[in-house]
Image (tube, grey):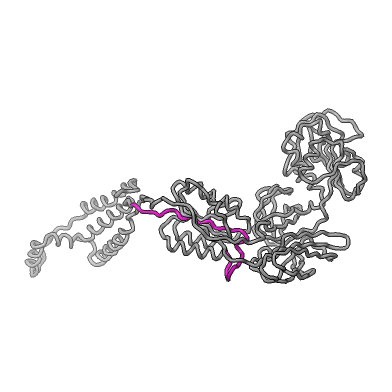
Amino acid sequence: MGFTSLVNLWTLVFPLTVVIYYLFRKRFEPKTISSTLFWDDDRREENVSPFIRNLQRNALFYLQLMALFLFVWMLLGPFTKQTQNEGVPLVFIIDSSATMLATPKDSTLFEMSLVEMKKILVSEVGRPVSIVITGKEPEFAIQDSDSLEAMQAIEGLTVRYEQNHMDTSIELVKSIYSENGAEVHIFTDALNRTALDYEGTNMRWHVHTNDQKLSNHSIVRFGANRLEEGVTAIVKLHHDTEKAQPGSIQLKEADTGKVLAEQSYHGEPGSEELISFRKIKTDVSALLVELNGMDDYRADNAGYALLATDRTKVVVDAGLHELLKKAAQAIDEITIDSGEEFDEGAILRITDSEDFINKGNRPIFLVGRQKVKSTKAKGEVSVTNDPLFSIASPKDMYVEEIYPPFEDFDVLAKIGEDPLIQRSPRGDIIFLADLEATDWPLQPTFPLFVWSVLNSLSDDAETLGVFTPLQRKSVLMTEVADVYELSGSYLYTTESANTLQAPAIPGIYKATDGMTDKLFAVQLDASERSVAIGDAYSTGSLTATNQSKEQKVPVIWPFLLPLLLLLLVEWEVQRRRGYPY
């Protein structure tokens, strides 16, 4: 036995104080009384049992001493060392992707997996339990906890809709437990045996899968475009069924759920269908399409689209810097201007001729100038707090010569006191230097800046694009943004002004940075639009045995009740007898 709090030995002063108090208490002198009727009997009893007589007269003193010593004993924190046998670690890997919402029976695959996990826990009480949730960045719900905590953690598990990235979760578990051994249960719709083909690992794998063929009608693609005569939408369907199952598909407003149009589909086994909606009159910014019919997997029965015109065609002047063309090509399909005629209202031009500033009704990206002379640049580059620089900033750029600025244009960046980057009232972006006179094309921020410019000038700049569940992407926002559902319910705040992680559940959402509101869509990943079938199996060898763990067991609680009883007896003695004499 040992003690955890020997520093509390100073509390021995309390029982010593009681002893000293009784040694120096007031002494009473015996006096002769007139009646001696019971004197002989009293003396006889005292001579026969002096010890008991002493206890009777000093009961309160001894009780107080016992209580104080017991109290000091508890303050010292007594403990005993105990060796406890622990079982081989039990690890659950639970697939949280959307396909786990498939319903082969009355429950989803995810719910059936949770029930099976609980059954395993009941039969394996006493083993350390860990639960890994799959995803691009897998995480532990609990790690090396007891069965009670594991039961509570299982109750809080939910589907995250994200692609499972099962190989990443398996690698995580293997890196932690392969040396000492573990028994791993994987719950998913299907998993190939080659995924667990590891040599030299001390692990036993049990794979729990879906073994039933499901009927599934899925929306493979959905796109919509606003034209002069109205909205045109096209939906591509895939029917993974064993027999024909016709149904209907509805086009709705994403925010209100109002049905704009409805068509039927044939649902032939293994077939694909294209359903088109034309000349739909609506002024909403986002559309929803839904399938209605018999289906064992409904998570892929909805699709979302942000209404915008076709992405602007990018045209780059032939005489511009070659690295500028490469940067634009890496971002989007571009056309090199060879002198042919373009509809200036339908293209996004990158040029060095300021003549295009007054031509057409679409902003341009002007790099350099042709009709003025450049001058020597002096100073360092500084930028304003503009969304254009939220992804990449040219602060470390060297500039040898610059061109005169345009009057009454906003200045976004300077070199020394001279403007370097400007924006016109129409939205044109002007870079007042030839790229040959800078080292910017050699820096990694250059293609990112070109992407920011093209994104800000394109037609869909009022949206943030399409995400997959929990996907993290770079966006153009001035400040950190608050993310809302279309209904107005607040969800969360982004980590930074230029990074957005999408919500888990597919749908249309709104991000606002205090200045602008931008919509974005969350769609299921293509891999989550079909449910696989797989065999359950076990593989791997486990040679680990029960592990011994030495722990300290406190022995305070057994003395708590006797201490309370002693205090109660002291109170009763004090009440009946008072102080001894």
Q: Is residue 319 left or right of residue 197?
A: right
Q: How many marks?
A: 0
Q: Is residue 83 left or right of residue 472?
A: left
Query: What are the residue bounds of the magenta stretch?
Result: 83-109
Is residue 497 visible from the viewing direction of this image? no
Let me know if residue 32 is in the magenta part: no
In the image, residue 290 above or below residue 97: below
The one of 52 and 161 positioned closer to us in this rendering: 161
The one of 454 and 27 positioned closer to us in this rendering: 454
Q: Position of residue 360 (x, y in %)?
A: 91, 48
**Residue shown at the point (66%, 52%) measured from the top left:** 471
The one of 110 and 452 positioned closer to us in this rendering: 110
Q: Is residue 102 left or right of residue 13?
A: right
The one of 468 and 556 positioned closer to us in this rendering: 468
Residue 253 falls in image quadrant? bottom right
Q: Position of residue 362 (x, y in %)?
A: 87, 48
Let me know if residue 90 is in the magenta part: yes
Q: Position of residue 301 (x, y in %)?
A: 69, 65
**Residue shown at the point (79%, 58%) measured from the top left:** 307
Quadrant of the rendering where the C terminus is positioned: bottom left
Q: Position of residue 324 (x, y in %)?
A: 80, 38
Is residue 103 visible from the viewing direction of this image? yes
